[in-house]
Image (tube, rainbow, N blue to C red):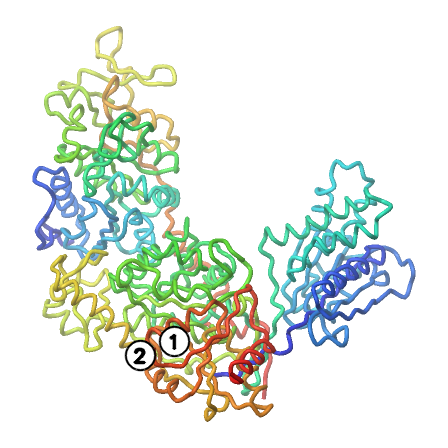
Amino acid sequence: MTSYQPKEYKSDQTVRWCPGCGDHAVLTVLHKAMAQIGVPPEQIAVISGIGCSSRLPYYMNTYGFHTIHGRGGAVATGVKTARPDLTVWQVAGDGDCLAIGGNHFIHEVRRNVDVNLLLLNNKIYGLTKGQYSPTSARGFVSKSSPYGTTEDPFVPAELTFGARGTFFARSIDVVLDVSQEVMAAAYNHKGCSVVEILQNCMIFNNGIHNRVSDRATRAERTIHLVHGQKMLFGKDNEFGLVQDGFGLKAVTIGEDGYTLDDVLVHDAHCQSNFLHQQLAMMDGDTLPLAIGVIRDVEAPTYETDVAAQVEDVKQKHGFHSLREMILAGDTWQVK
Amino acid sequence: MEQNKVQFRHSIVVRFSGDSGDGMQLAGNIFSNVSAGVGDQISTFPDYPAEVRAPQGTLGGVSGFQVHIGHGVHTPGDECDVLVAMNPAALKQNARFLQRNGVAIIDIDTFRKQDLLKAEYTTDDPYTEIGLKAQVVEVPITSMVKAALDGRGMDPKSVLKCRNMFALGLVCWLFNMPVEQALTFLKHKFARKPEVYEANAIVVRGGYDYGHNIHATVSTYRIKTDDVRPGTYTDVNGNTATAWGLIMASEKSGLTLFLGSYPITPATDILHELAKRRDLGVKACQMEDEIGGICAAIGASFAGNLAVTSTSGPGLALKSEALGLAVMAELPLVLIDVQRGGPSTGLPTKTEQTDLQQALYGRSGECPLVVMAALSPTDCFHSAFEAARIAVEHMTPVILLTDAFIANGSSAWRIPDEDEYPAIHPNRVPDDVAANGSWHAYDRDERGVRYWAVPGTPGLQHRVGGLEKDYTTGALSNNPNNHEHMVRARQQKVDNVALDIPELEVKGNPDADTIIVGWGGTYGHIYTAVEQLNAAGHPIAMAQLRYINPLPRNTREVLSRYKRVIVAELNSGQLARYLRSLMPELPISQINKVQGQPFLVAELVDGIMATTNN
């Protein structure tokens, strides 16, 4: 198998995001992840909607389609269903994916189309210069909510699970190794893989993710989940997650009678999403924010089943041509 | 062009049939009275059983009542357009009166095994057994009547006696008859039994509302083809012919056919037919909404399929932004708009030609695309093929306008031989260009058409999208002069399609002073009217437009030969306005109708006479 370098996935276009934007890091990691995965650039289609992050296809040396606001999911569904042999990536922001594109998003997830969806969540509309988004916290002050919003946000993971998602992973723009790990995992998962990347907008929402992204406190406020491994976090893995009734609790190993044996082992492949949801809803406040692959289960994919059904029906009562099909119906001769 | 004639279908024949105790005569009588009340001529024919009281559900107990309504009605009619059969025995006895491809409305609740036995069926498949060649509408009449009258304390027998009224209500819906008038007749009949009236009224309304809710439609028009070339024929309606024309284009281009769609009356049957055609390799996908439908199609087109989306007027409105994307990305796409009465939800089951301006202009920016219109049910095949051919060979979205009238109307159709249609050539990047690595995404050929580089091809990776691109490099550009250059390039590309379509053909008497111009599905009516006028010694020419944007290249030359140009269309003057904007010198007058109904031939004859006498 040919091996690829990250630069082979990079187009010749000048990247035009603002200096310091989290999108730069995501792009660089994506180039690396694609080289690691090793699918040839011509076998890849990168689809996006509209927004800052949706410019990403222009910076890829793959096939790329920058579509219209919110509709990347529907376009990606068409690409993958038409051509299951292609590897399809989709890039969307929180407004693109969860506001104007909310309907396409939930149905793309429900159908389990094999698309790797990078959801860059900066909790703000950047391209239109600073309005609150569907992931902005209640009370968030922005140009379009000068007195604070009076609505609750979506949690992307919760929406994904509500739409019966089969894969959800999370990373933070500055945590490059985890971003690359979850992108590769998204590729390996057959089905709709939702990867939320918490991304910083320097201009309109600077520092919105600081609580979890800040290098000084990140070890205590995030937990890197890995399938089959104990749920430990902290600089020296001194903390762990344990079951607490129907919920979760963070404990210090060796205190209050908790030992390493009490700490939960992550099972991303569990069909039930009950615990995945608990893990995904942790927000870095009383419980650490979960990064890494939270859920990764197998299920039939839409495009595979469409293609299989076409083959099956063709086998069973297929016709060689339209004419043959029509002639098999009710006809008469005129001489 | 085939010789389509709409034949005297200004009248319809409905046959009500059931057990002699089912009250079919009453339902039929009320229906004919209501029809007379709206100005129709009527002729009725009761068909009683020989036995006064044969056992229920048996062949001997069937009674029928045939109603012929409309204009020029002198007999009860030989064959019926619609047969209402309240049980299997009634269907068996009356199916022979139903014309080929007519509509059979049956009470499916009465088609249980024991009912079939009583009516002497020998198989489980009653339709095949009696050789029924009809569109069967299966309605659970008995159970809906029971539900409608639930809680009124009526005995079961009285409840069942109201079934005829459900059928009456449904037929009133189908033929646009005022249900209130039916109720007035009932009130009169049951003046002394208000509780019976009330129960019947509830059920009549129930039947009417059921028709409304399921968007029940029947085509009451039969388009007959004079042009009987030898060959193998079948019956086809416009929606099916549209689906088949697209499949033919898929075969002729070697591209997989992909449909992204969302259910909408009266276009849904295209989705139904293409969903069935997995047996021919078609990928039909029902998406989450209209926008999803077109966007999935655009994605499939980007990926290299022959991509189609089907809809009606309100859906076209929802798709307009995505159409702009397809124009900007210069990808092939066919959009079928089966026009219905508008605006908004309007008259969802009725026909109109009111989406022309939306198709021509309904997008942001300067956003040219090809607009076509199919002329008849069978022409939907040809027009759909042409729409796909133009889309693929000219890398442009094409809107094909059909309408509820031709979509549901059916006609005998000669099945074309495989070599009657040409191969379609996708505009692939030439090998030498691909090989030397000099290709850019928006390079154009000598016709101004972009090339179609399909994902998976090594060395042709490129990016397209809604943002303006540089004419030469295909990179993002907001250079003012480049933008204007690209606006013109997109327009020129669509204008050049005129070089690749047939010239406008004149029919009727080409030497007349007056030409009548129509477009799309009014062809049969206009053709019939023109034929009648010429036969009566009033010379008149006609031209029917299938290609609207761009127009056939000889359009101006043809129309300028006439002293009068009458534009007839089922809207307030959309084509007339379009032609005036392009050819202000033409002496255009108009015949318009916006009632959700097709033209009547007589209306056209009168309209033309009135105009030419001025």
Quadrant in the picture for residue B78: bottom right
Residue named by callout 1: B547
Residue B141 left/right relative to A107: right
Depicted B534 relative to depicted B218: above or below: below
Task: Name the spot of residue B79 as percent of width and height, x first.
Answer: 72, 73
- Name the chain under label 2: B
Taking the view exactly as shown, the residue that stands out farthest to the front is B614
Quadrant in the picture for residue A184: top left
Residue B574 left/right relative to B397: right
Residue named by callout 2: B498
Which residue occupies the foreground of this view, B488 or A195? B488
Identify the element where label 2 is drawn. helix
Depicted B379 relative to depicted B353: above or below: below
Q: Earlier in the sequence, mark 2 or mark 1?
A: 2
The residue positioned 11% from the left and 51% from the top of the image is: A10
> Residue B102 bears which disc, if any?
none
Task: Name the spot of residue B121 as percent of width and height, x first.
Answer: 76, 61
Which residue occupies the foreground of this view, B526 or B449? B526
Type of amino acid under label 2 = Ala
Discs 2, 1: same chain: yes
The residue positioned 34% from the left and 47% from the top of the image is: A113
Task: Name the spot of residue B327 as percent of width and height, x first.
Answer: 28, 63
Taking the view exactly as shown, the residue that stands out farthest to the right is B52
Which residue occupies the foreground of this view, B211 or B464? B211
- Name the chain under label 1: B
Residue A179 left/right relative to B195: left
Identify the element where label 1 is drawn. strand
Task: Name the spot of residue A23 as percent of width and height, x first.
Answer: 15, 41
Type of amino acid under label 1 = Tyr
- Residue A321 visible at all: no
Q: Dots 2 and 1: beta carbons under 8 Å?
A: yes
Quadrant in the picture for residue B164: bottom right
